[in-house]
Amino acid sequence: MPAKSGIALDITADPLEIKQEILKKYPAKVARKRAKQIIVNNPDDGNRVPEIMANTRTIPGILTMRGCAYAGCKGVVLGPTRDILQITHGPIGCGFYSWLTRRNQTKPRTAAGANFMPYAMSTDMQEEEIIFGGERKLKKAIEEAIHLFHPRAIGIFSTCPVGLIGDDVHAVAREMEEKYPEVNIFGFSCEGYKGVSQSAGHHIANNKVFSEVVGQIEMQKEGAYRFNILGEYNIGGDAFEIERVIERCGMTLHSTFSGNSEYEEFASAHTVDLNVVMCHRSINYMAEMMEKRYGIPWFKINFIGAEASAKSLRRIAAYFGAPELVEKVEQVIAEEMYHVEAVRQEVRARCEGKTAMLFVGGSRAHHYQELFAEIGMKTVSAGYEFAHRDDYEGRKVIPNIVVDADTRNIEELTVEADPARYRPRRSEEELRQLEKQAGIGFNDYVGMMAEMKKGDLIIDDLNHHEAEVLMDKYKPDIFCAGIKEKYVIQKGGVPLKQLHSYDYSGPYAGFRGAVNFYREIDRMVNSNVFRFVKAPWQKKPELTGSYAYNR
Amino acid sequence: MLLRHTSEILVERSALTVNPAKTCQPVGAMYAALGIHNCLPHSHGSQGCCAYHRSALTRHYKDPIMATTSSFTEGASVFGGQANLVEAINNIFSIYAPDIVAVHTTCLSEVIGDDIGQIINKAQADGRIPKGKRVIHTNTPSFKGSHVTGFANMTQSMVQYLSETTGKRTGRINILPGFVEPSDMTEIKRILSLMGIRSVLFPDTSEVVNGPLDGRFHMYPKGGATVGQINSAGDSQFTVALGRTASLAAAKLLDTKCGVPFENLDLPIGIQATDAFVDCLRKTAGVSVPDSLMVERGQVVDVMTDMHQYFYGKKAALVGDPDQLVSLAQFLTDMDMKILYVVTGTPAGAKFEERIRSLTGDDTVVKYGAGADMFHFHQLIKSGKPDLIFGNTYAKYIARDEDIPLIRVGFPIYDRVGHQYFPVVGYRGAMHLMVKILNALLDRQDRDAPEEAFELVM
């Protein structure tokens, strides 16, 4: 059937049929579970969406995209900070694989400033420690690290065997901190088997950073309109672009959790007047806890997408409320958008109507839909790798989420107002006013599904077989996922954009980032290179010539 | 400076590893298992292990790396991983239909003490393994050895599970290629075919992890040694095992289990090691060396002598895996280069150190196993600068800080392509490697030469 009005695809693909096609290959038990994680979207006017199962166990033997709690804790949340020295306690592998592979960029303020990110440190646990315990070696490793590197803070990251053999990394941390009081030492029980994915590690990281680091230093960066960005990890320089824009607006970014960050910024993060949250999944715990203890309000923003960036800046300005700030922000947006718009129009002409699928992370599969929409591309199917129901359906479902055994094993901190330092930055009335006037949803995230269309296929924890069916049925112009999926998809002649590592490109955040992304997607969906997949004789196999020597 | 905290002053460390010169066993086992045709490697542990190993291998090959995991949760870690593995086996055969599943363990399942052989038997008894399909396993505790040990263990398990003897010799020669690139495996097969020798090579990752883009994803690519071939290895005439750490264990087992005698040679990197390989093949197969191979050899010697002035006396620092290091050290010494440092995180043993010294002389600093990491390697480099560094991608941080050219060899190489397609073994491989070394040295001379001494002809 010919496409109408530039929208090419939902004509051929019936999402329910595709769901059945996916499920029919599975053993009954697998099919039953997956059926609850594959949902045809159907949002109503009140932002109500169908229920999706998420944050549940990966099925053994399924080719999953997911990683582990250690990766979420050490790799994602703590990885991007440069001056907390990180020791992996365990056999060598985990420390090795998390060594610089996430592309978190960082820029120390001076040439001599501490930067431990290019160093992978590990206790390289041997059989002897597995049998007799690894605490002694860990203590020694901490001492050696202090003598060699003189860090202000040390984080210890537990790998699977640590929990099983019963090493108490927290006791070791306390003991070593007593011996070296000038160093803040803390441990993370982020064994890989905790929870069901990276997500458990995010929570574990949030808890420790909140209880051991935030609030340790009373320091305020100079400047007006001070706030933190939570859940921005400076992949490919995203944080640098965001910092640039915020500085232009005359606002003060006190700290970022944790792109391009330093210990001191974390430790004094409680002194700001606002937290804004980028990646809801990985850091919402921190926002909640900081509000409860220190009275700092938070709301969700998104610097992925030019329009989204503009909207986020306007909301932050509205929160601070100063007319000169609002004016300045409008001026910056106008100037930035002028450059963005020229490229956007040019690229849009070539990308309009093309289709994308996004299966990644706990936020990116949602955020990046904005960038695709800006160049006229449609997202036909999307899902997260390790998100929870609230990331799909919105935070309003949190009270209804059944807490299972895997989640119960992750500590939920009880946080109360700090008797001396709790200071509500805005009154309840002011907050309600801002909600009404500026459309700011405090403590809220509407989730991915409310912002996607009816009929879009939403799949949680997508696996290889499902990706193959989607590719076959939807034939998208681009697929977004991670390194493990990249070449699987590309062998089929369709480009895959890595949205963890950005394919060693970026930044994609903010205004300049949007321009980079438009250009990059244009390159990928309109490229010459995939034309060569078939040789000329495969396209026209009939023999019409004669042998040269017969002439 | 990227590694701004690395000082020249050596401080004794006994507990902290900084910038490891090795990684853990399972990734090597996964790589080896990819060298069996229609095989799905399976990681028995937390899903993070599998994700990390697949990511590492994918970054290195820029090709799909397919493997499954038992996806342990806290419950499995307490009660054992049997239920997870049995369920995984059932799902794998139902959904992905491989001929064979090759299970390797992780530190987690090793600490729990899961008995994989017994679990496989249970899966078999429960009818979870379809008729004619195989499940094999190897133990790869991450707290022992290194990625090379994991490769060796999986290769040994292939023999353990699959190789049988009928008592009738096939006249073939087994080649255990060691932990080398698919390009190297192709090159070894080409040499054997030039010499007219019938062989069984396993594991064989060529055309598995360096496959073509043909418009279709192939879950099980064309390459890999078939189960039948590995089975028949027990009937071969002889085994040539390349590399001590990666191949000796499997060769020994083929000997004791199936009575196939073997010789353990260095990886055929460089002229002497390739000579030894070809000579061994010639003698055991009773064939003569074809002229075409002699031409390739002669060309290597030709370039080596033509360009000798650029190699002579150049100082090299080597970090990597033991089997590669031995052959590299020999090749570079043959080219009249001087080996300053040789470092491997793999516990390669005193024999390794002796071997290196016998090749390079007593001045070479050799470090292996505990305490031998790239931080130490960097400190050595700071104490006396080489002209060239040989190592994996991580060595580029040292190379940039110290402004020394890096020749990328070993695993992993995340930032360049070529290793998948161009071998370093055999005479062709020696040529390729030598040209890389030469170009690095000449580019450096061109960059640094004063204008008046800038050479047109070199």
Image: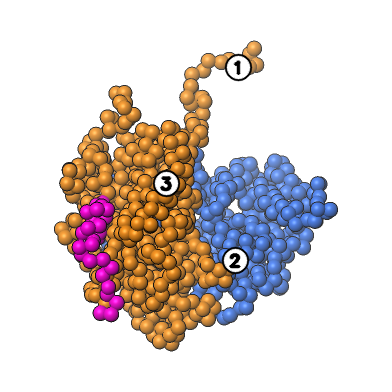
Chain colours: A orange, B blue
Q: How crowded is mark 2: few (under 14 residues within 10 Å), some or many (20 or more)?
A: few
In x, y percent, where is residue B229?
46, 46
Amino acid on which the number 2 mark rests in the picture: Met
In x, y percent, where is residue A20?
22, 39
SS assignment at label 2: loop
In x, y percent, where is residue A168?
34, 79
What's the distance in space between the residues labelled 2 and 1, CA to CA?
63 Å
| Residue A103: numbered disc | none
SS assignment at label 1: loop
| Residue B1: numbered disc | 2
Secondary structure character of the magenta stretch overall: loop
Which residue is nearer to you in this view: A62 or A147?
A147
Amino acid on which the number 1 mark rests in the picture: Tyr
Instruction: Inspect this view and state whether residue A483 appears.
Output: no
Instruction: Inspect this view and state whether residue A244 appears.
Output: yes
Magenta-drawn stretch contains A439: yes
The label nearer to you, 1 versus 3, is 3
Query: What residue is shown with label 1?
Result: A547
Magenta-drawn stretch contains B401: no
Q: Mark 2 lies on which chain?
A: B
Q: Residue at x 58, y 47 (%)?
A: B418
Check contact, mark 3 vs mark 2: CB within 8 A.
no
* Res A436 → quadrant: bottom left
What's the distance in space between the residues labelled 3 and 2, CA to CA?
38 Å
Q: Residue at x 34, y 29 (%)?
A: A6
In the displayed structure image, the side of residue A325 where residue A294 appears, left or right: left
SS assignment at label 3: helix
The magenta stretch spans which residues? A419-447
